[in-house]
Amino acid sequence: MDMLLKPILIVYNLPNSMIGFAFGMVAIASGGSFQFREGCLEFHGGFIRWFLKNIPPWSKNAGMAAMTLGHVIIGQNTGMLARARAHEHVHVRQYEIWGPLFLPVYLGFSFLLWLSRRDPYLDNPFEVEAFGKVDHRRT
């Protein structure tokens, strides 16, 4: 990526990344850790492990391996981060396009899908793209 463009994209996504960074600070305070991989800050363990295991709370299939917030990826542990990294980096690129609008648009799609009795996660166009670009049989 162009050396000038990357800093602009990081600043453009700062509101989203700061949410991820806040999760990261809580993770660190609760025994978690962090690492820097492929241009993103990754936090894992501590509170994040509990949080990702229990969302969405209304679902009997609750639990996520990882979640992207701007240029920050949070994961239950390093193994799950490694397996989810390619998928999560598709979301990083989506954040770079949508910027501060990503979260409201993502949640809006999920809400509309839920209203139409479709899967708010698997049928979300952002997830469809991420799952479509990553061969999950290898992860």
Image (spheres, rainbow, N blue to C red):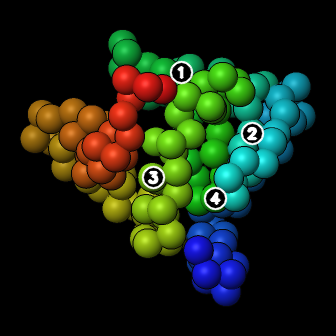
Q: What element does badge 2 sit on?
A: strand
User: Label 1 belongs to which residue?
Assistant: 54
Which one is earlier in the sequence, the residue at label 1 or at label 3?
A: 1
Q: Tell which residue pokes out farthest to the front in this image.
A: 138
Give the CA distance from mark 1 to mark 4.
23 Å
Which one is earlier in the sequence, the residue at label 4 or at label 2?
A: 2
User: Label 2 belongs to which residue?
Assistant: 43
Q: Tell me the mark number nearer the camera, choosing from 1 and 3.
A: 3
Above or below for 70 versus 80: below
Report if residue 19 is visible in the image: no
- Residue pictured at 48% horizontal, 26% vertical: 139
Is residue 122 or residue 114 the one in the foreground?
Answer: 122
Above or below for 53 versus 115: above
Above or below for 61 versus 103: above
Label 4 amino acid? His
Give the CA distance from mark 1 to mark 3.
23 Å
Is residue 66 or residue 18 the one in the foreground?
Answer: 66
Q: Tell me the mark number nearer the camera, choosing from 1 and 4.
A: 4
- Residue pictured at 43% horizontal, 62% vertical: 94
Label 2 amino acid? Phe
User: Label 3 belongs to which residue?
Assistant: 90
Q: Tell which residue pokes out farthest to the left in this image.
A: 116
Which one is earlier in the sequence, the residue at label 3 or at label 2?
A: 2
Q: x and y percent of residue 65 in the render?
A: 54, 27
Report if residue 66 is visible in the image: yes
